[in-house]
Image (cartoon, grey):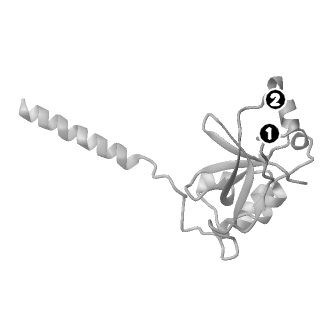
Amino acid sequence: MKRKLMFGVVVAAGAITMMVAQEPKGGILHPEMTVGADGGTWDKPVAKIGVKSGEPWTQTTIAAGVNSQPQPGKAMTVVGEIVDFSCYIQLGKHGEKHRSCGQKCVANGQPIGLLTQTGALYMLMPEEHDPRRDGGVDAKASASAHMGHVVEISGTAASVHGYNAIYVQGLTK
């Protein structure tokens, strides 16, 4: 009986060890891929993008919402590295060495991301609904100019089923 109990404890301890060893560690993928010397730091971002607002959504977004009620959002300011969302998720690429590839990907329609110091990843897009829909605002120019740089982003954070986004107000085309 003691042998069976001891065997059960050893098996359980081994299973727990395996589960812990396989948990994702979090943080930034490939931290060896760093921002260039002129790309800003977490404490001193190279640029500020977006307009700080006391309200999470603009009138055009509120009007476009189902029953004039967009999904919940929170106005916030976040510091992070501008990344090509697709290459970061697929390959872990970011930083100065990935800058030109990221610029090409964003110019050709790949989504823009903001990678925080903790490894959180947000998709970035213009906040103003109707101008965004009608092509009046675009995030590609600012994303390309600051690809691989650490910037301060002001906008509205929203999440749906594990997808996180920041909608940036004040972008132009």
User: Which residue is rendered at x = 76% and y = 62% of the image?
Assistant: 48
On screen, residue 119 above or below 127: below
Q: Residue furthest toward the top?
A: 67
Residue placed under numbered mark 1 in the picture: 57
Image quarter of residue 146: bottom right
On screen, residue 26 above or below 151: above
* Amino acid identity at mark 1: Trp
Residue 19, horizontal then vertical, whole percent: 35, 43
Residue 36, horizontal then vertical, whole percent: 66, 73
User: Which residue is rendered at x = 72% and y = 69% of the image?
Assistant: 46
**Which secondary structure, mark 2?**
loop
> Is residue 23 left or right of 148 when viewed as pictured?
left
On-image quarter of the N terminus: top left
> Is residue 4 left or right of 69 when viewed as pictured?
left
Q: Earlier in the sequence, mark 1 or mark 2?
A: 1
On-image quarter of the C terminus: bottom right
Residue 17, horizontal then vertical, whole percent: 30, 46
3D distance between C-alphas at marks 1 and 2 = 10 Å
User: Which residue is rendered at x = 88% and y = 40% of the image?
Assistant: 133
Numbered disc in front, either 1 or 2: 1
10 Å neighbourhood of mark 2: few (<14), some, or many (≥20)?
few
Residue 136, horizontal then vertical, whole percent: 93, 47
User: Which residue is rendered at x = 78% and y = 41% of the image?
Assistant: 55
Q: Are marks 1 and 2 in contact (CB under 8 Å)?
A: yes
In front here: 107 or 159?
159
Residue placed under numbered mark 2 in the picture: 65
In front here: 82 or 97?
82
Residue 91 - label: none
On screen, residue 37 above or below 131: below
